[in-house]
Amino acid sequence: MDIYAVILRLLHIVGGVFWVGVAWMIAGFLYPTANASAPEGPKFLQRLFQGRLPAITSAAAGINILAGLLLYWKDTGLRLEVITQRPFLVFGIGGVAAIAAFVIGIAVTKPAADRLGALSKEIQAAGKPPTPEQVAELQQLGKRTFDAAKWVAALLAISLVAMAVARYL
């Protein structure tokens, strides 16, 4: 038994299950429900994203990607004659989709969610209703994070399908 491969596979699968589950739950259910539940729904999302969920999800995603890369390297040795075989091409497509989802999460979702939280705190500290400019910025940031969440969920769907079927191609 190759304990290294077993541990990497376990980390890859558990990290991926958590990451995909959170992404699909947020994009498919939480955002649409929160947006339909205004004005309280967006406050719920702001509170959710100010908690531990983003950090835990990022950690799971990072572990998933690192373990996946190490498994790919272990299985292929990064040799051209191996990585051009159909299963490893499909694993590669899945890996690229997951990395793209991670980059969107870090480069788009996190800064927008951070600004949403900061703006919400500014509004609360002022003790009065938000200005029209603040409302417009809140809506724009909410749309940006929701659009990014949909892209992340879609890319992770591609990755999940690729990982599930690659060995059988």
Image: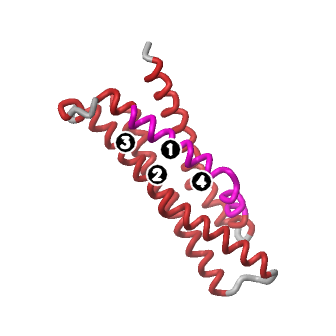
Q: What residue type is labelled 4?
A: Ile
Kind of element beneath mark 1: helix
Q: Can you tell which quarter of the image residue 14 is in?
A: top right
Q: Earlier in the sequence, mark 1 or mark 4?
A: 4
Distance Cα–Cα, label 4 vs label 3: 21 Å
Q: Are marks 2 and 1 in contact (CB under 8 Å)?
A: yes
The residue that mark 2 highlights is 102
Q: Count the numbered circles shown.
A: 4
The residue that mark 4 highlights is 26
Give the crowd class for mark 2: few <14, some 14-19, many >=20 residues within 10 Å: many
Q: Earlier in the sequence, mark 1 or mark 3?
A: 1
Residue range (magenta): 44-70
Q: Do the residues labelled 4 and 3 touch (CB within 8 Å)?
A: no
Distance Cα–Cα, label 3 vs label 2: 12 Å
Of tags 2 and 4, the one toward the viewer is: 2
Q: What residue type is labelled 1?
A: Gly
The residue that mark 3 highlights is 94
